[in-house]
Image: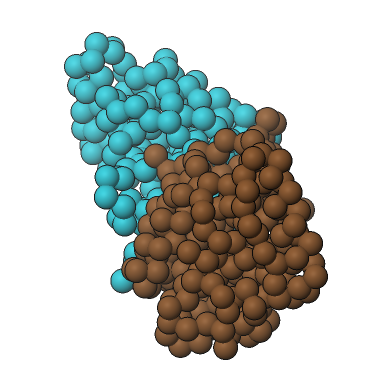
Chain colours: A brown, B cyan
Amino acid sequence: MRIALCGGTGDIGEALALRWAYHTSHEILVGSRDPERARGKAEEYETELDSRGVDAEVKGFANEMAADRADVVVLAVPAYHLVDTVEAIADRLDEDTVVVTPAVGMKRDDAGLHYNPPGAGSVAALCADAVPEGVPLVGAFHNLAAGRLADLDADVEWDTLVFGDDPDAKDIVSLLAEEIAGLRALDAGGLANASEVESVTALLINVAANNDGLHDLGVRFQ
Amino acid sequence: MRIALCGGTGDIGEALALRWAYHTSHEILVGSRDPERARGKAEEYETELDSRGVDAEVKGFANEMAADRADVVVLAVPAYHLVDTVEAIADRLDEDTVVVTPAVGMKRDDAGLHYNPPGAGSVAALCADAVPEGVPLVGAFHNLAAGRLADLDADVEWDTLVFGDDPDAKDIVSLLAEEIAGLRALDAGGLANASEVESVTALLINVAANNDGLHDLGVRFQ
């Protein structure tokens, strides 16, 4: 399968690119607004993988070129770039391309981080309004500490919550998630359940900030 | 220590009453609007504990009498009864009584359960507005599956998130939480962080509803 990581030069994009390249044989396409930057990061990822004896081919492209080639497009961009990014790639998407949103909206005050959904009610709802009609949209990979996931020496035992209104698309994303060692995909229901999933990210960061010895947290439901 | 469970005849009240009576020597006071009902449930809990060889004394009272005697008062009532309950016990509270709110606000639609905070922003904020000035308020015990916790044969390995603006009160509640086998108390910061904690309950229920083999879930941060 071909997986495009639009915004694949950022934290969660890097983590997913490295993990999929390390644990699977999927073709990884790193996307960026700046194709030179995408190619540079793709080379970095290849070097990192090569140092571990993994001969993976990771390619860098402009976001729209990465999306054009992909079966699954992960919008690994900050929430405030989400709509711009979708608009840039929209004419490369069709009903056979699964779009994945891991983005969350947060704001910081003196007490810590808080979930700060856009007017649409959730980042996923904002994304659903932006993607072309008929393109399946799935939410996943929100509640993962990107830095720890990008460290291929780190063991994780985390759940990722997968939601959306297209069951087949959710299944594809869940399988991709579970190909990453230590990740379990759990079904969190439809797009209407997005905000409860997205808000966990702020909580994870607050808990890490307030408890000695805990950092780079994920979550396990048990 | 004397712990009053106002609404201690309900699900989470029963779970906490049984667990503290089982694992600790704290004095457990079951409160209800109806003192007869409180006494009946307290006897039920004693019988359950006796059947396991634990000779605990659990007493039932009207909520205000339970609160009057207690060092820690847990408001184990549904969110829509919270203000009424605080008003009923308000003149029994003082700055030496730690008040604990485990309540969450939820609404159901076709997709599942959703966090539905009151106008104050969180149930804890609503509670903070209702308790008398100077009474320390702590949020805890929101994200626990009450039915499973009430089953003394069930092993749990869960975190409970403790938040509030009074560090000493938080410490007291955290210690009480960790006296329950399998519970770890994590500091989630101040009252301003309440909504991200409260919203997890709806998520736990949605995840249990959508995944075969998962039910009565709690959460572990790792």
User: Residue sitting at 63 percent across and 85 percent down?
Assistant: A87
Residue A96 location, x and y as percent? 43, 78
Looking at the picture, how far across and down is residue B205, in whole percent?
36, 53
Q: Residue at x 43, y 26 (%)?
A: B182
State the image coordinates of residue A9 (x, y, percent, origin top left): 72, 62
Q: Is residue B98 above or below residue B83?
A: above
Q: Which quarter of the picture shows residue B52?
A: top left
Residue at 63% over, 48% down = A55
User: Which part of the image, by quadrant, shows the C terminus of chain A?
Assistant: top left
**Residue at 43 percent of width and 82 percent of height:** A95
Task: Return the residue nearer the eye: A181 or B106.
Answer: A181
Using the image as rendered, state which of residue B115 and residue B45 is in the foreground: B115
Q: Classify residue B17 as left or right of residue A156.
A: left
From what the image shows, is residue A92 above or below residue B107?
below
Q: Residue B162: where, in percent of width, then height?
A: 57, 39
Q: Is residue B61 left or right of residue A154?
A: left
The correct choice, above or below, for B24 with respect to A137 in the image is above
Residue A199 in view: no
Which is more toward the observer, B104 or A215? A215
